[in-house]
Image: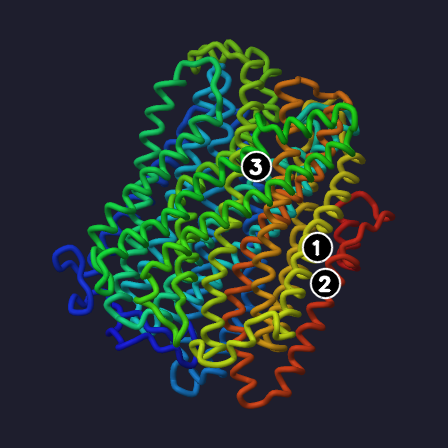
Amino acid sequence: MAGSAPVHAAHHGGGEANLVVPNLADTSIASFMHGTAGASLLYVGLAVCALGMLFGFATYSQLKNAPVHKSMLEISELIYATCKTYLVTQIKFILILEAFIGAIIVYYFGVAQHYFADGKAAQVAIILLFSLIGIAGSCAVAWFGIRVNTFANSRTAFAALKGKPFPAYAIPLKAGMSIGMLLISVELVLMLAILLFIPGNYAGPCFIGFAIGESLGASALRIAGGIFTKIADIGSDLMKIVFKIKEDDARNPGVIADCTGDNAGDSVGPSADGFETYGVTGVALISFILLAVRNPTVQVQLLVWIFVMRIVMVLASVASYFINDILAKGRYATADKMNFEQPLTQLVILTSIVSVILTFVVSSQLIPTLGGDSTLWWKLSVIITCGTAAGAIIPELIKVFTSVDSGHVREVVTSSKEGGPSLNILSGLTAGNFSAYWMGIVLIGLMGTAYMVAREGVGHIMMVGGFDPSAVFAFGLVAFGFLGMGPVTIAVDSYGPVTDNAQSVFELSVIENIPGIKDELKKDYHFDVQFEKAKHLLEENDGAGNTFKATAKPVLIGTAVVGATTMIFAIIVALTAGFTQNTDKVSILYPPFLLGLIAGGAMIYWFTGASTQAVTTGAYRAVEFIKANIKLEGVEKASIEDSKKVVEICTLYAQKGMFNIFLTIFFGTLGFAFYDSFFFIGYLIAIALFGLFQALFMANAGGAWDNAKKVVEVELKAKGTALHDATVVGDTVGDPFKDTSSVALNPVIKFTTLFGLLAVELAEQMKSNDTTMPTILAAIFFGVSLVFVYRSFYGMRINAGAEPNVESTAKSSAAA
């Protein structure tokens, strides 16, 4: 069980990593609902998580056993095989990156904090172990995501053959819900295990190690997956213009890579990202509570309360899913047409309403009195509700800019009719800019409301020196609430890659051309096939998938930024000794702080350029290879060998781009932290704020371009026209915007902030003995980061003279 309760949570050497978690089983410290220990409530939470995982695996089994024609099954299994190869390659790569992080962890705890000298080598090993557990968690949920989605894509394509829209909606959502439930349940089990089974004085380091590990895993999978998927997508899409072939033409060797990329970028990345985001926001709040709250009773009450809230919202999500399923089935089960977005929107809104109601009901019973105040339960509930409401409000706002029915998307289509790709791109940029403005206003409203409520008495239970940190706590709770209904948020995000793949599986299976297929389906599956209706339904459903992929991105991005506020607060507490000294340096009047703000902005724009450059060069190589090897006459499908070579090109440039990006961030973080700690605070604040608006702008501009193309294809049925070509160009510009640069900023912000916790304290530790060496190291680290900045462009430039094959591509990459 957790260690004995301290009188207060001292912030001493080692900072957050040395915080002690109080004993949650000791009812003399705090009890709940007529004398129940907090640990007992959390044990119930473990049982709920076990049921959540059971739900995920049961759905996995249902999807695996769902009916599907062998021609479609062969394609989905090929996609899974390439996805699995990609993921295994990425895991090996992540373990190499972990060596860099592990070295810093060992040096910081083992040497700088004297753990080795004090006989605490086992504690260092435990911290390293939990960083590996964090990586394993991110990779495991990513694998589960691709396996479930590659079951669902062929089953969705097959179900559409009946000509009814409801199965084409229900299967992708069921797959998404299984991923969401398993992901959140696994995350909660791991965090509850640390709280309940790790001794209290070890829990702090375990949480920090775990958070850094899952953040590293998510960053690598998000960045590399984003590069991979957009290389493949652009390579495949441009063939529609070059050769005037149809969407997902089976003769195009880039289509299998595109399908793999849909899973690498839109399934693997978001699954790992959601897992990490859910965990890191929890770790940030735990650290805050133990830093800012001095009363051990209130500490226990708040720790138990935030985890019970998460457990309750898991129940709210699954209950809302079943209710929504009944409502949607009643309305659309036998319908010939349906608005695919309507039941998805209904699910999000229903879940948020149920979650808000349960938040107030459970809080009133769990913490009726907090620190002697009987009003704090509803005030904290209002603050969390600001985050929960964001989970419903933000998707609705984003649909204004990205939905197939939105005015902005229609404007992109209209401008393309006369202005071609030029005005298409300008209209998409406009949509992205407007969306960032309105998202900013919404965040101000939600966070401002939380701040005003926090001012009404929340501060009296937490003080750091003479500073009232209740507003920071409120912002952390808003971030916490963003992902409160995590299973549903993940479900609607995962809907998109299934619908996208389903359309591709239909075309790649060439099921229409199989001799006697109509009679075979009638005999074996007892329905009359409707090929044209099925194609239309799958294309229309893909538009809904695009919309909800777009709506989930800002939720994760917003969570990263708001949650980073809480983690930055922890660093400031350490640097100011609890706001008792150096507070004047957390100001733009202190030049290093101001310079740090500028550096943070510069880093965001470098990252955007570096990730886009990796996509550009990789896509060039993919297009070069496909154009040289595509066979349009006398063949029905591209060869498996050619398709795999395109996958190899995508993997090569994804890893090369990721390596440059990660090492720039790694050494840049060390360099800035060692140069000046308050410079580094400014840097962290800047990457959060610049990153927020850069990500929102890019994600929503890309979403508008994507669905403008879908309007032209599905509604206007104008494939092969100049208008379609213009929207394809806009979509390929938007690809790295929405699925590479923007989404990867989320884990990058959190990883930099988490790793910064260790980097700053390591630098301060060294400066207490020697001020010269940290400055020298800062110059060396920054110099190394500049090498990788240089490599991220000059080492990734297109070498136009290279031969269009994988082998020469690999050689030119190695030479660069």
Residue 186 spot, x, y in % from top left: 37, 51
Work out how far the residue at label 2 is from the one at label 1, CA to CA, in angstroms. Answer: 8 Å
Q: Which residue is identified by label 2?
A: 789
Work out how far the residue at label 1 is from the one at label 3, CA to CA, in angstroms. Answer: 28 Å
Residue drawn at x 31%, y 70% is 21
Is there a contact, CB below 8 Å, between mark 2 and mark 1?
A: yes
The part of the image, by quadrant, that contains residue 389 is top left
Looking at the image, tell me whether mark 3 or mark 2 is earlier in sequence order: 3
Work out how far the residue at label 3 is from the one at label 2, CA to CA, in angstroms. Answer: 34 Å
- Residue 664 seen anywhere in this rendered image of the structure: yes
Q: Amino acid at mark 1?
A: Ala
> Which mark is drawn over residue 79?
3
Looking at the image, tell me whether mark 2 or mark 1 is earlier in sequence order: 1
Q: In the image, is 299 to the left or to the right of 800? A: left
**Nearer to us in this view, 267 or 466:** 466
Q: Amino acid at mark 3?
A: Ile
